[in-house]
Amino acid sequence: MTRGNPTVRAAGIVALVVTALLGSAYVLGRSLIPDQPQARKTTGVTTNADGPYYADQPTEAEPSGAPSPSRGAGPTEAGQDGSGRDSGGGQLFGAHTSTGTPRLALTFDDGPDPRYTPQVLAMLREFDVKATFCVVGENAQNHPDLIQAIVDGGHTLCNHSWHHDVTLGNRSADMIRADLLRTNEAIRAAVPDAPIVWYRQPGGAWTYPVVSVAQQLGMTPLHWSVDPQDWELPGASKIAATVTSQAEPGSVVLLHDAGGDRQGTMDALRRILPDLTARFELEALPTDPT
Ligand SMILES: [Zn+2]
């Protein structure tokens, strides 16, 4: 009974040495890669679809075609306004979040929509409430009768861009200006003398250029302070509970009368209006903001 075979033992030592050498070479190789901080920085850049592809991160590169759970959001969700994505980490660049008075303002985004906007108008009329509608240009073009109905009801209008482009603020000032002007033209094709003194950036994705262009065109940037995230379809009870519990003097409430199934918002509004009108004075945002 012998203890160990010398040949096997020698082979083992050689293997250890080779492993150590390879390890050193690997460490040396890693230390020669100069761009680790840059690689981390560019990871964020590559989340931009237009960003360049960096080939210097072979060990960190995701396998192409791998599913990304963060990209699972549907188009409806990605196109809506809501604080879940928007006001959480974004900057407002001075966009208003309050009426500036004790009065509360209801705002309805993304319409007009032939299914829901008439329902909203009927409920507002029933409770003698005036509100503000942040309309999308192409919807205004398609439904001029609803723009007229909004104005006839004593409500005020807010430009919400031509096509609800949440990335509009990243485009050139000329493109932003053209988008906002086209939207105003569609509104005024329906109601020629309609005052349009408010602008709400889709998704609340404000940038300095979009705020600046809106102001140059005589529109005040309008954000919000109460957001029940009705675009996520939480149900009428939750929408109503969020609005009635968070409402306070000066609140600007964000609701949607278009952009998806809004029955929950319609049902919520029927509960919200009696509560809010009992506690606050409600107003349409003025057309002569100072
Ligand atoms: Zn919107």
Image (cartoon, rainbow, N blue to C red):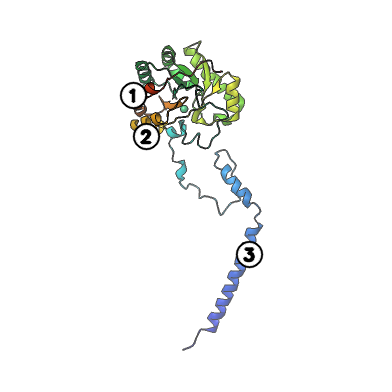
Is 31 in front, or is 222? 222
Identify the element where label 3 is drawn: helix
Which x, y percent locates residue 6? Answer: 55, 84
Residue type, label 1 = Arg
> How far apart are the alpha carbons under marks 1 and 2?
16 Å
- The residue pinned by badge 3 equals 25
Say if 250 sits above or below 32 in the image: above
Residue 54 in sight in this render: no
Crowdedness near tag 2: few (<14), some (14–19) or many (≥20) residues, C-alpha within 10 Å:
few
Looking at marks 2 and 3 on the same chain, the residue that comes earlier in the sequence is marked by 3
Determine contact: label 3, label 1, CB under 8 Å. Answer: no
* Circle nearer the viewer, 3 or 1: 1
Say if 244 sits above or below 123 in the image: below
- The residue pinned by badge 2 equals 234
- The residue pinned by badge 1 equals 270
Residue type, label 3 = Ala
Looking at marks 1 and 2 on the same chain, the residue that comes earlier in the sequence is marked by 2
Crowdedness near tag 1: few (<14), some (14–19) or many (≥20) residues, C-alpha within 10 Å:
some
Number of marks in picture: 3
Q: Quadrant of the C terminus?
A: top right
* Residue at image location 56% in from the left, 33% down from the top: 91
Looking at marks 3 and 1 on the same chain, the residue that comes earlier in the sequence is marked by 3
Crowdedness near tag 3: few (<14), some (14–19) or many (≥20) residues, C-alpha within 10 Å:
few
Residue 101 in sight in this render: yes
